[in-house]
Image (spheres, rainbow, N blue to C red):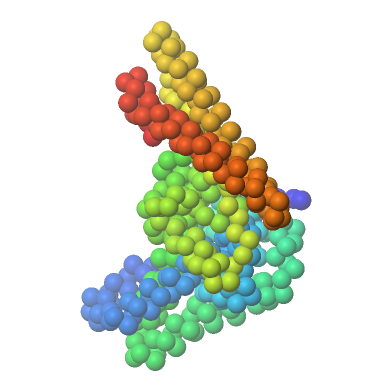
Amino acid sequence: MSPIRMVRKVNVANLCFFGTLLLVSLTALPWHAVHVGLSRAEWSLFLAFVLLTGLSITVGYHRLFAHRSFQAHPLVTFLNLFFGAAAFEQSALWWSSLHRDHHRYVDTDQDPYDIKKGFWHAHWGWLLFRRSEPDYRNAEDLQASALVMHQHRYYLLWAITAGVLLPLAIGAATGHLLGAFLLGVVGRLTFVHHSTWCINSVCHVFGRATYDIDATARDHWAVAFLTFGEGYHNFHHRFASDYRNGVRWYQWDPSKWLILLMSGCGLAKKLYRASPQAILAARTAAEHQRIERALAGRGRQDVAALLTLVRERYAHLKTALHEWEHVEHDYRRIRNALVDRSQASLQSIRPQLKERRRVFVDARRTWVTFINTHPLIPRIARI
């Protein structure tokens, strides 16, 4: 399979389209807001379409189509294609093909929004000054869908209908046609576009590498807030197929909550989750690597002794995690057998599972306390 073909050529259509959107958003929209005012109906239309189009990109284009993180009811597929087109980020097939190449060739010349070519290239320069020609052989699964292919072939019809005509019709019905155009179409598109592009730029420069310290992808809570949970980008690049980006319960990820809600209503199924042990192993390994690198090159005897202690604690933590994972694997295997004679085995293994998890939690708590309180461990390496 050949990688994406990127031609160094000014994309005049994109330059005019995105440039005009930004110019109108920075000039005509503020002038209208000051001299005419924006009504509650206009703000409601803006927020509704930010929500509908933004979630259709994150839940639909990204997690459903690009990564196949879950399976969706045909109604959900249609709505994500409809409002995804309204975001004017191209067809789901085009978007997903490029995004799969981003993950496959991340930070190389074949990466369509390679951060190593610069912040603004990753943000929107790749759209303005290069022409992307995806190799759709990396998306044959999507090409098998008649609905996806219809949206791809007639993308402009879908986009204009959903992204322009529908909000204008609502604006006309409420007596705010001009406001609907300026805020509900132009302002909304500008906001959704640049929020989405912040994932390619901001989240590959700023934030914390929680699960893979060698990746340029970073976890950034502010971008997560703007993009319905997409800002936990270091986790996503480490566990790309997981339907969650904000994996911890308190992390802002409305996209995962919506997918869970759809699952409970029978509209989504086969949600892929990375195992808790795999996630904790990656997180702990990143913490260990950060300490090793922070202390590397220091020849002091007390630092050498500290590194020995760090490695011993890390080995103990890995052992506890491995033992918990082993018992959990046995538990799931027996549970999935679904035969009566397995119930006794299931009952007998539950206390072991609980105990292994407790041992790991204790080891993890000791590890975190050790890292955060030892005077020789630099603040940058603390958790």
Residue 171, horizontal then vertical, whole percent: 39, 86
Residue occupying image coordinates x 52% and y 55% = 244
Residue occupying image coordinates x 52% and y 79% = 162
Nearer the observer, 364 or 273: 364
Residue 7, horizontal then vertical, whole percent: 64, 54
Nearer the observer, 112 or 284: 284
The answer to whether residue 343 shows anywhere in this view is: yes
Nearer the observer, 346 or 201: 346
Residue occupying image coordinates x 44% and y 82% = 167
Compared to 45, does 338 lie above or below? above
The answer to whether residue 14 shows anywhere in this view is: no
The C terminus appears in which quarter of the rendering? top left
Q: Residue furthest top?
A: 301
Q: Residue furthest left?
A: 35
Residue 340, horizontal then vertical, whole percent: 69, 55
Residue 282, horizontal then vertical, whole percent: 54, 37
Total numbered badges shown on the rendered structure: 0
Residue occupying image coordinates x 49% and y 84% = 165
Compared to 284, does 51 lie above or below? below
Q: Is residue 307 left or right of residue 159?
A: left
Compared to 340, does 360 lie above or below? above
